[in-house]
Image (cartoon, grey):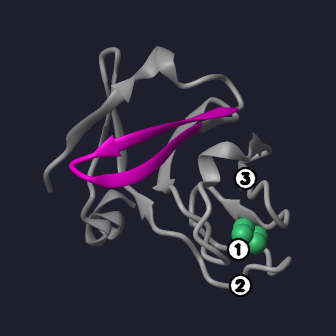
Amino acid sequence: MSYVRACLLNEVPEEGVVAVDVNGTRVAVARSRGEVHAVQDNCSHSDVPLSEGEVYDGVIECWLHGSCFDLRTGKADGNPATEPVAVYPTRIDGDEVLISLNTDDQGARR
Ligand code: FES
């Protein structure tokens, strides 16, 4: 499992999100309920950045049509998006947020 630096922890707002580019992959690093998560930074309904949406109660809400995605699982609420978004395993190392772009690592984290 290889983790790479995504951003500094203090760049991620409480109940907010920041867009980062990790080795050419657009990633939305979000913090909600004190937990930091990383998901693919494009909605599964249409290719718009989720990082421009709002974060609250453990979800990120797409700004275009309002679908909410669970930050832990990537699952969509079906309003209108039905497909999940990728969730990347995340680790905090000191003041840095590290993520693994290999979503297969997800199972190893649990
Ligand atoms: S583009 Fe995100 S819900 Fe439609």
Residue 46, by quadrant, is: bottom right
Of badges 2 and 3, the one in the foreground is 2
Secondary structure mostly taken by the magenta-highlighted segment of the chain: strand
The numbered disc on residue 59 is 3
Relative horizontal placement of residue 19, taking residue 51 as reference (left or right)? left
Magenta range: 16-30
Mark 1 — residue? 76
Looking at marks 2 and 1 on the same chain, the residue that comes earlier in the sequence is marked by 1
Mark 2 — residue? 82
Q: CA distance from mark 1 to mark 3?
A: 9 Å
Q: Quadrant of the N terminus?
A: bottom left
Is 84 situated above or below 30? below
Q: Quadrant of the C terminus?
A: bottom left
Q: CA distance from mark 2 to mark 3?
A: 15 Å
Q: Residue at x 34, y 43 (%)?
A: 21
Query: Ligand 1 is found in which quarter of the picture?
Result: bottom right
